[in-house]
Image (cartoon, rainbow, N blue to C red):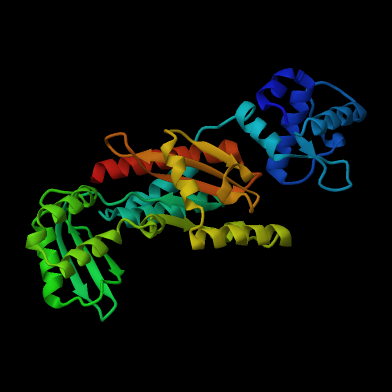
Amino acid sequence: MNDASNIFEDMNDRSREVFRRIVETYLATGDPVGSRTLTRDMSEKVSAATIRNVMQDLEYLGLLNSPHVSAGRIPTQDGLRMFVDGLLEVGDLENADREMIDATLGSNSSDVGNTLERIGNALSGVTHGASLVLTPKHEAPIKHIEFVSLGLDRALVVLVFGDGHVENRIFTPPPGQTPSSMREAANFLNALIEGRTLSDLQTIIAQQISDRRQEIDQLAHQLVKSGLAVWDEETDIFERLLVRGRANLLNSEAEEEELERIKTLFDDLERKRDIAEFLELTDEGEGVRIFIGSENKLFSLSGSSLVVSPYMNSDRKIIGAVGVIGPTRLNYGRIVPIVDYTAQLVGKIIADRS
């Protein structure tokens, strides 16, 4: 297909109106749109035959296609992209939607994780899609680190942050660990952590181990590296991705082929494959972005769209994102302000509580 902006500029007013009305009707109903339907809605009186000719031209340009033998047309992925970029009218956030999202803040809980869980549930409820919330890593200064043996091949590393937040991870320690080596490793780290965040600590550990090798034996040295590495692994990133509202996409009206595509999407999310594609969206700057179908590798098999916006902390640094997954016939004009508002709300929550 040629550049969409050039095609849009080359279209006459009638072609644009036919295209816009087909897409808007399809997004509202999910059904193919025929020429007779359009004759009742056009701003100028034109025959069904004239509209059919316009529809054929739009199909030739790759903007529409015919899903069945019927005369009705639906937009292609390229057509939806051109509509979103050039014709989409984004409405104001509806009061009812704002109130439902704001209601998640009714609890005074200081636990950001619980708040983001509630926001994810509200977002899926408001949009009738599946919500994604990429939560920020906890970046408060660390107060205390402890290693706890759970058996021969399992151990727990516990981080207590200065704001009272506690995180722990189970990991496989190096062979031969003893209670004394675990105490030594914890003492070594606790001597370094004053006023430092986890990110700060990870950047200085290697240098400190090298400079102070005589202060820590080999077993404790290995434990420090393996115990902290668990926070650096990709699994930590994936555990920060909250997915809510799967059932919204698995309604009984969906065709079997569509259900299989959606199940494939959720299988990918469960296995955390290609989640890096989602994380990379947060590096593209602020504002809502729309990915339709195969424009995002994560959703290429599901025939789904993603509306996503990053959120920022008080330093204007992007630290996470919120998004909605739905069918490609999402009501984009309504979903965009909902996602935008939610992202700004989450950013304010993070800034206020940090």
Judged from this view, the residue extending furthest toward the bottom is 151
Left or right: 264 with respect to 270?
Answer: right
Which residue corresponds to the image point at 13% horizontal and 59% vertical from the top-left?
189
Image quadrant in which the N terminus is located: top right
Vertical side of 279 occupied by 269: above or below: below
Which residue corresponds to the image point at 63% horizontal and 45% vertical from the top-left?
294
Residue 39 visible in the displayed image: no
Image quadrant in which the C terminus is located: top left
Foreground of the two, 284 or 133: 284
Judged from this view, the residue extending furthest toward the right is 49
Residue 322 visible in the displayed image: yes
Vertical side of 282 occupied by 250: above or below: below
Q: Position of residue 334 (x, y in %)?
A: 56, 39
Q: Position of residue 163 (x, y in %)?
A: 17, 53
Which residue corresponds to the image point at 38% horizontal and 51% vertical from the top-left?
104
Foreground of the two, 126 or 87: 87
Which residue corresponds to the image point at 90% horizontal and 30% vertical from the top-left?
48
What number of labels is visible?
A: 0
Vertical side of 233 occupied by 350: above or below: above
What is the quadrant of residue 223 in the picture?
A: bottom left
Foreground of the two, 301 or 214: 214
Left or right: 37 with respect to 332?
Answer: right
Q: Position of residue 60 (x, y in %)?
A: 82, 32
Q: Position of residue 17 (x, y in %)?
A: 75, 25
Left or right: 224 with respect to 105?
Answer: left
Left or right: 112 with respect to 249?
Answer: left
